[in-house]
Amino acid sequence: SYAVADREYAEREAEFLLNPNRFNVSITRPRAKLVVWISQEVLDVVPRDEETMRASMALKGFVAFCRDGTRKVVLPGPDGQSIAVHCHYRKLNHGR
């Protein structure tokens, strides 16, 4: 999960959230299916230092890769208001 609700928090924690080693571990462990939750706040972060900016390209590139389809799902929020979730996916055909 790469979800945070606060943009300022995402900016402060950008080095951790966008770390390519963390992302590599996240995507190489699953055996059959991978589901990644990434908030828009994390994707919108523009790191201040060049190294973190380069590191962020792995995660942001993965999101760009997952563009076979998009679905908007509306979920109930904890305060009774609706929350719109945009789901992007990539179809993988493993010989089936």
Image: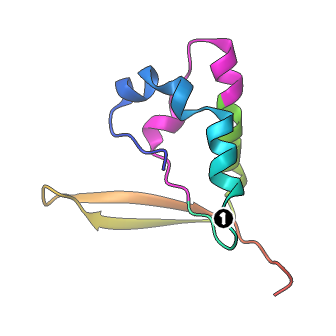
Q: Residue furthest top?
A: 49
Q: Residue furthest right?
A: 95
Q: In terms of secondary structure, where does tag 1 sit?
A: loop
**Residue at the disc numbered 1:** 30
The residue under the point 51% across, 32% down is 44
In the rendered structure, the answer to whether residue 54 lies left or right of residue 6 reads right
> Of residues 35 and 43, which is closer to you in this image?
35
> Of residues 4 and 84, which is closer to you in this image?
4
The residue under the point 53% across, 37% down is 43
Give the extent of the magenta segment: 36-55
Q: Residues within 10 Å of mark 1 (few under 14, many from 20)?
A: few
- Residue 60 visible in the shown view: no
What is the x, y in percent for residue 50?
A: 68, 13
Q: In the figure, 64 relative to 93: above or below?
A: above
> Of residues 30 and 70, which is closer to you in this image?
30
Q: In the figure, 2 relative to 44: above or below?
A: below
- Specify the amino acid type for callout 1: Pro
Q: Which image quarter: residue 61? A: top right
What is the x, y in percent for residue 27?
A: 67, 54
The residue under the point 66% across, 48% down is 25
- Total marks drawn? 1
The residue under the point 33% across, 33% down is 6
In the rendered structure, the answer to whether residue 28 lies left or right of residue 9 reads right
Q: In the figure, 45 relative to 82: above or below?
A: above
96 in the magenta segment: no
41 in the magenta segment: yes
